[in-house]
Image (spheres, rainbow, N blue to C red):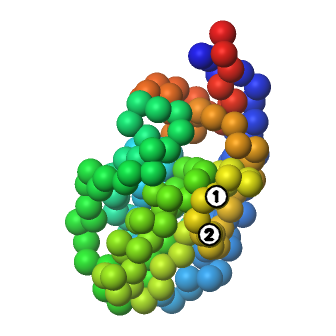
Amino acid sequence: MRPGRILVDEASIATRLVEMGDEITADYEGKDLLLVAVLKGAFMVVADLARRIRLPIDIDFMGVSSYGVATQTSGVVRILKDLEQEISGRHVLIVEDIIDSGLTLDYLRRNLEVRQPASLEIATLLLKTGIQRVPIEVKYVGFEIPPDFVVGYGLDLVGKMRNLPYVAVMEEE
């Protein structure tokens, strides 16, 4: 497999993250905002998005896995790294690279809700259309994409290709 057609180019990603940053800045003015990036894929998204939010923010990371070495989620979620900070009473924004089945994010959302944040919302760069197996309310969506397997901008195939500055559809060779 190799990266094929570019689905979302570098300039479009940059433009959309500025817009999302503006929306988040307006929505969280005067609030204690904590961005929770879901590792490993969201590290690029959270870094670029955080620079577009014009508020004092805090960032923490969670590591979760539901893929292993597959290209489709297994539905079995494991927390590999938990938050280092207390979130009770704080406004929490989960930052994802991509949402497909929604199973991992639903598990993560439920896990964080019991910690009693003041609010809990979701931002994602990519939302695959038509394949959610659980309803997920996403406040900030960068791009809706078809249900193809994609790489780049933090998204990987067995740990590789995260460093591509765009999002591309994987193709069979």
Question: At x 70% / y 43%, what residue is drawn?
Answer: 147
Q: Distance between the residues labelled 1 and 2?
A: 7 Å
Query: Residue 12, image x and y in percent?
Result: 76, 45
Question: At x 34% / y 58%, what residue is drawn?
Answer: 61
Q: In terms of secondary structure, where does tag 2 sit?
A: loop
Residue 98 placement, left or right of 160? right
Question: At x 60% / y 51%, what residue is drawn?
Answer: 100
User: 154 or 148, which is in the foreground?
Assistant: 148
Amino acid type of the residue tagged 1 in the rendering: Gln
In the figure, residue 139 lies in which quadrant? Answer: bottom right
Q: Is residue 166 visible?
A: no
Confirm or deny contact between disc 1 and disc 2 (CB under 8 A): yes
User: 39 or 27, which is in the foreground?
Assistant: 39
Label 2, residues with CA under 10 Å away: few <14, some 14-19, many ≥20: few
User: 53 or 138, which is in the foreground?
Assistant: 138
Query: Residue 86, image x and y in percent?
Result: 26, 77
Q: What residue sits right under mark 2 in the picture?
A: 135
Q: In terms of secondary structure, where does tag 1 sit?
A: loop
34 relative to 154, above or below: below
Task: Using the image, tell me which numbered label, if any, was put on residue 132.
Answer: 1
Task: Using the image, tell me which numbered label, if any, was put on residue 12.
Answer: none
Amino acid type of the residue tagged 2 in the rendering: Pro
